[in-house]
Image (spheres, grey):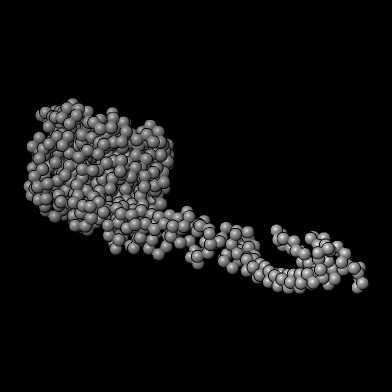
Amino acid sequence: MRRRAAPSGAPALFLVLAGCHVFGTLEIPCPGPGCDTSAGLDADDTSTESDTDTDTDTDADTDTDTDADADADADTDADTDPFDLDGDGWAATEDCDDGDPAVNPGAEEDCATRDDDDCDGVLNPIDALGCLDFYDDADADGWGTGSPRCLCEAGATWTASVSGDCDDGDPAVNPGAVEVCDDGADNDCDGTPGTCTVDTASLADGVRLTGEAAGDYAGYPVADAGDVDGDGYDDVLVGAYMNSSGAGLGGAAYLVRGGPGLTSGGLGSAITYAAAAGLDAVGFSGAGVGDVNRDGYDDMLIGGNGDDTIATDAGFAWLVLGSPSPTGGTLTTSIAYAYRGESAYDYAGYAVDAAGDLDADGYPDMVIGAYGSDRVGSAAGIVYLVPGSASPTSTDLGTVASWTGRASLDLAGISVSGCGDVDGDGYDDVVVGATGYDTSSGETGAAHLVLGDATWTSGSLSGAVTWTGEAASDQAGRDVADAGDANGDGYADVLIGAYANDDGGAEGGAAYLVLGSASPRSGSLSAEVQYTADTAGDFVGLAVDGAGDLDLDGYADLLIGAPYDDLSTGDGAGAVYVVLGGPAPASTSLSTELRLSGLYSGDIAGGAVGRGGDVDGDGDPEILVGAYGIGDAGYYAGGAFVVYTPGY
């Protein structure tokens, strides 16, 4: 017999099925076919009522139960979900990865995964968790435009992490670019086209090259080396005359190769030319001298006035030829050509420079000073001309053309410089300092102009054009330089330092600009354009040089060192003044000019200055500043600055 229990909570039914009696909830079995059917009934009960009840109840039960079962089975089939294998609450039919509970339609897209975390069919869309802002950078210069997109990684043109590009079609125009003077374009996106000035220059913004060890005196001197390796970028020569990279305290010179990636750092990583013997003073002077042998690479001249090869302190200068891969090394005739002094204590190589093409033969020439020479009198001094040629050779300086000092103790050759064509005759000229030169006013010092010609024979500086210092002990001629054409008249001009001049205060110093002309004349420097110190003890004019045309106005500009200037950053910090050229240069105090101050007390910035070449390849010259008091690697380790001029 089959029975179905009543659903929970349903009322109990009185049922009579196939001879069995159910009363209330008690089922009474019938013993068999002959059983007493009246048993267990009330007196009022009849078989008719029982039959009626049985038929009715049976039909009702049968119909009701069958329908209920069918409905229940149908409901159960409809509500049951497919399997959720990863237990993330999403059925396999909806979950795109039912083996990973972190992946389902309710998850957040995450840049940290390579999955379609939210099952939307898009991998790592915009604004996913952990995204980064990228800007549209169509010209791929690293600077974008417009609003950013938050992306998991850069893609297509959305690659820049910074915005602000004012011309996304030109990679040379962006906020990180250098302003090009007067080209009419806003190259650096500052809102102003490139009208250039010099009033924002600072040594703090320059490339800082520091000496290797205490007492190296790096940065005395600094010079434009030209393009020594032929890579299209001009290089820098830095001397350190007490360095011990080679022999003890023999000195060294560093070649710092130019390029757009030049950064601050120690000179130990530069190409080094070291002394072969102690106290040679290698690097006390140095200069780029052009392509002396015309092989396509610029060459360098390095002085060492303490060399003893010929005699004690006779001195020498080394010609180092350029090449595609300069390597440095110990200065011997295996890597350079030697020009050696004549006699003891000549101090040949105390000053060296490019002379230009003095005889107009197409080869650049060189000039070497030996202020201690006694050839015509004790320490009268001498200057040597070493001609350029296709095949340079080592030479004793006594065999080349020379100009001797006028008298004993003139110290002629304590400074030398090629100075361009001062008289406009087609031949380059040379200027020679002689700080011991005497006049009726005393030991004023002087500078001699030796005019070039086709023959270039030896002679005496007594026959040269001579400009004398204003007063006794001025030390006029302590440094001399090619000023370029400062007033734009077509003649090269000359810059002369007199660091002990007192016009601006005791030993404040001064520098003089002597303008070129068809007929240069001797005279006192008091008649020339004078730039005086604004404070006593500055030593203005200890170092001078032409700067080239920094502001691109057609007039050459000037650099004047004041190594003991204290005005801006402390005692002995030093400074370099930038004086702009113009059609009518006039005497003035340097207090009105642009000052590039040393960074720290004791730096002695401006102890050497130089017109740099185009170190970074932007078409403009740089400013070179020696600061031999920098103490990064120890007391007087020294250093130098390369100050870029773009934007001036």
Q: Give 65 or 345, whichever is nearer the viewer.
A: 65
- Residue 69: quadrant of the picture: bottom right
Number of numbered discs present? 0
**Can you give x and y, in whole percent of width and height, for residue 445 in the image?**
17, 33
- Residue 83: quadrant of the picture: bottom right
* Residue extending furthest toward the top: 506
Is residue 605 found left or right of 195 in the rendered image?
Answer: right
Q: Give the vertical position of 201 relative to 170 (above or below).
A: above
Residue beneath the point at 53% across and 59% down: 106
Residue beneath the point at 83% across and 63% down: 43
Residue beneath the point at 68% across and 69% down: 68
Q: Give 270 or 430, whichever is nearer the viewer.
A: 270
Q: Give the vertical position of 45 relative to 594 (above or below).
A: below
**Can you give x and y, in whole percent of width and height, for residue 313 in the image?**
33, 36
Q: Give 457 or 490, whichever is nearer the viewer.
A: 490
Does residue 184 show up? yes
Residue beneath the point at 81% across and 66% down: 45
Is residue 167 found left or right of 95 in the rendered image?
Answer: left
**Can you give x and y, in whole percent of width and height, for residue 212 in the image?**
41, 39
Is residue 269 found left or right of 418 in the rendered image?
Answer: right
Image quarter of the N terminus: bottom right
